[in-house]
Amino acid sequence: MEIREILERNPIIPAIKNEDGLNEVLESSSEIIFVIMSNLINIQGIVKKLKEAKKIVFVHIDMIEGLSSSSYGVEYFISHIKADGIITTKHNVVAFAKKRNVSVIQRFFVLDSFSFKNTIMHIRENKPDAVEVLPGVMPKIIKRICNLVNVPVITGGLIDEKEDIINALRAGAEGISTTDKKLWDF
């Protein structure tokens, strides 16, 4: 699965965090979905419903309540949940997933020049399949990151207007994730 190709077809990625989002996203035209909040009890059912609807599912593994980000927790997730890929902020999880041939999107919060430099360094070291940069309403920073790395850049966080999407795409982002349902089919 090539993330860049998926993003070309689906630059706006619905991100769901509850049952309402799940039910609505099942009817959306988007091919790729981010599950950003869940728990150990409901994650398997969420992924199963999305897969039955022919969606490509990436799960934010750090946000699964009750699941450890140790290698045992990640191995359990990979073996039992059957998502198409994971989202994580943790470098050890990126390395573990890559060794298991699981697609991984590494999420970074860019808050200052120090976190910007660390983001670039970690992208180059970890070589995730894609990165997600937050907050998504900083076109200047998105453009700088896109110019410095050779992986698809997705942006999210605080995206709540069409203008935010347009600005992020113009800055070079290849995808935008949002929990705002009114933007899912923009």
Image (cartoon, rainbow, N blue to C red):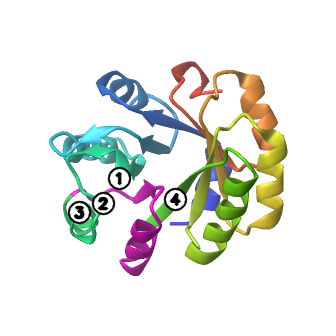
Tag count: 4
Position of 100 compared to 151: left or right?
Answer: left
Q: Give the range drawn in magenta.
A: 81-101
Q: Which of marks 4 and 2 is nearer the N terminus?
A: 2
Give me the C-alpha separation between circle 4 and circle 2.
15 Å
Q: Position of residue 62 (x, y in %)?
A: 36, 51
Q: Is residue 10 visible?
A: yes
| Tag nearer the camera, 4 or 3 | 3
Q: Where is residue 168 in the image (x, y as percent from the top left)?
A: 76, 39
Indicate the amino acid at tag 1: Ile
Position of 112 compared to 93: left or right?
Answer: right
Q: Mark 1 points at which residue?
A: 61
Q: Position of residue 5 (x, y in %)?
A: 63, 59
In this view, 166 is above or below 35: above
Q: Do the residues labelled 4 and 3 touch (CB within 8 Å)?
A: no
Q: Which of marks 1 and 3 is nearer the N terminus?
A: 1
Which structural element holds mark 1?
Answer: helix
Position of 101 compared to 72: left or right?
Answer: right
What residue is rendered at 39% in x and 26% in y? Answer: 21
Indicate the amino acid at tag 2: Ser
On residue 69, the disc is 2
Q: Can residue 171 be seen in this view?
A: no
| Tag nearer the camera, 1 or 2 | 2
On residue 73, the disc is 3
Q: Are marks 1 and 3 in contact (CB under 8 Å)?
A: yes
On residue 105, the disc is 4
What residue is rendered at 67% in x and 38% in y? Answer: 136
Q: Which of marks 1 and 2 is nearer the N terminus?
A: 1
Give me the C-alpha separation between circle 4 and circle 1.
11 Å
Which structural element holds mark 3?
Answer: helix
In this view, 60 is above or below 100: above
